[in-house]
Image (cartoon, helix red, strand yellow):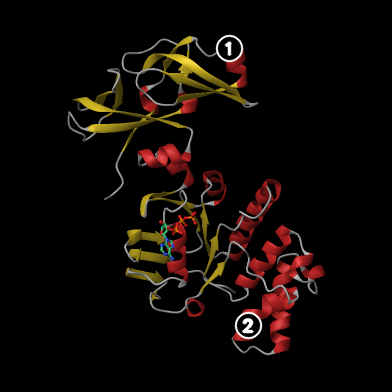
Amino acid sequence: MTKSADIELAAVSKAYGQTIAVHPVSLKIPAATYCCLLGPSGCGKTSTLRMIAGHESVTSGDVLLGNANVTDLPPASRGTAMMFQSYALFPHLDLVDNVAFSLKMKGVDKEARRREALEMLALMQLEPYANRRPAQLSGGQQQRVALARALITKPEALLLDEPLSALDPFLKIRMRAELKKLQTSLGISFIHVTHSQEEAMALADLIVVMNAGRIEQAATPRQVFEQPATAFVARFMGDHNVISGRVVESGEDHTVIETTAGIRFQAPASAAPVGQMLDLALRTDRVVIGGEIEPLLGFNGVVSGVEYLGATVKIAVAGAGIDEFTIVTSDAAYFAMPVKPGDAVPLSWSARDVITLGKADA
Ligand SMILES: Nc1ncnc2c1ncn2[C@@H]1O[C@H](COP(=O)(O)OP(=O)(O)OP(=O)(O)O)[C@@H](O)[C@H]1O
């Protein structure tokens, strides 16, 4: 049986010469977690993954797996396995030999390693293709071979760098479900690097949102979506409007900010003092068009664009000094009262739908 272990990053950083790819980050990934490292290109997620794998040295800090400090151990001695984006299969070897490769390196005898490789291929439903070479397989099958090859070492954690990026959209969604099923049945942690928020939401128990070499938020998908910690997270996860303004009133039960256009909005009570800039998030699906505007909980805008998306309709509205203010409404609500670019519309929301955003730790 494969065992699973907690993974901990303790103030781990990475510099490539003058470039700081990862500032000191600390993170705990409990055993048997599906963790997604999520962020835009260049945010440091691959460097972080490679430091956990041991394919990249750490500049400072420690990597702990279970009770062991693995910071200075080579990849093969850590109890982790990595699946690469390109799969890195050997073109001249059949699937059995591809999957058995790491056992061969360990000196396992031929019969034993072929038996284990066939078991692993069976787990991946690839037994019928055991004697084929990688080029004779579809993209999805090649990916399963790469998974089998990584898992044959019985790792405590599997590290995956953009594992779905080479697949077409249809296969991507199918393989996504297979990855999740596999992680659940093996009961080990998967750490999966992706720049797709949709992929992370669909798969992860723990989403780690990274930006410019720092962790902006590490939480469950639901927390990240419903309580984004920072303006970056709210924007990156999408489906939120971010409203920036200066605090003009800081009371015990609410805060009031004023945008550059001089329009005021109410937010929950906050420690931010009068004069400080503050960002609020408001979900695009919580804004009502055409209702009564309660004081400080809405504004009059002008429709600048309408996108029909089938089940929903996305409406862009200009006004109040808020860039790209978006409303997503159901198709039924939209067609009951359609609007078009140029229409003046009152927009309103409830106080409970406004979230105060913080700043990432410096
Ligand atoms: N070997 C290297 N030498 C110098 N700089 C590097 C090296 N590898 C990465 N970097 C830089 O470190 C930063 C983080 O890179 P990293 O690959 O970790 O980001 P990423 O979030 O995985 O991006 P992507 O999604 O594009 O792979 C980037 O600015 C990148 O240019």
297 vs 321, nearest the viewer: 321
* Residue that appears at 61% across and 53% down: 165
- Count up the numbered dots: 2
Task: Report the amino acid beneath label 1.
Answer: Pro
- Point out the quarter of the image occupied by ligand 1: bottom left
**At which x and y percent is residue 28?**
39, 61
Does the closest atom of ligand 1 sit within 8 Å of the Cβ of label 2?
no
Disc 1 secondary structure class? loop
Image quadrant in which the N terminus is located? bottom right
For this orientation, the residue located farthest to the left is 274
Reading the image, the residue beneath label 2 is 103
**At which x and y percent is residue 162?**
56, 57
Q: Are marks 2 and 1 in contact (CB under 8 Å)?
A: no
Task: Report the amino acid beneath label 2.
Answer: Leu
Instruction: Identify the mark at residue 338; answer none if there is no mark.
Output: 1
Left or right of 132 in this view: 172: left
Disc 2 secondary structure class? helix
| Residue 349 lies in quadrant | top left
**At which x and y percent is residue 185?**
62, 62
**At which x and y percent is residue 47?**
43, 62
